[in-house]
Image (spheres, grey):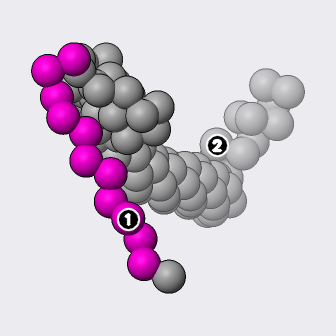
Amino acid sequence: MRRTLFKLITNKPQFVKILSVSLIAFIGILIVALVANIIKSVNLSAKERELKNQLASLEQTIQKNQTEIEYKQSSDYTDRYAREYLDKSNPDEEVYVGVSEK
């Protein structure tokens, strides 16, 4: 092995060719890895934006639902629901019933 390496080093044109090819191959591998990482980074950035938009949308939905829950837990809602759907009224209210024409 030592003799082969020594012969290779002493034979400069062949050594330079092998070294050049090795360096070019190494640089090529580095470029491919760099491009792959750039593509991965761009894809991850797009995914991050998509997830942030989805998070904002879900937070709006949560806020809307929270507001609706608070309203439906209020006495105003229960009074209105009782009047409209259960035909109930407060003792101090007068009830008017509309007559539909046929």
Magenta-drawn segment = 91-101
> Which residue sits at x=41%, y=71%?
100
Residue in the foreground of this view, choosing between 25 and 30 = 30
In the image, is residue 45 above or below residue 1? below
Residue in the foreground of this view, choosing between 20 and 54 = 54
Amino acid type shown at disc 1: Val
Q: Tell me the quarter of the picture where residue 77 sits.
A: top left
Q: From where the camera sits, is residue 58 visible?
A: no
Residue beneath disc 1:
99
Amino acid type shown at disc 2: Ile
Q: Position of residue 79 (x, y in %)?
A: 28, 25
Q: Position of residue 18 (x, y in %)?
A: 67, 56
Q: Residues within 10 Å of mark 1 (few under 14, many from 20)?
A: few
Q: Position of residue 64 (x, y in %)?
A: 28, 38
> Which residue sits at x=50%, y=82%?
102
Q: Secondary structure at mark 1?
A: loop
> Which residue sits at x=42%, y=78%?
101
Q: From where the camera sits, is residue 42 visible?
A: yes
In the image, is residue 31 above or below residue 83? below
Residue beneath disc 2:
9
Identify the mark nearer the N-term, 2 or 1.
2
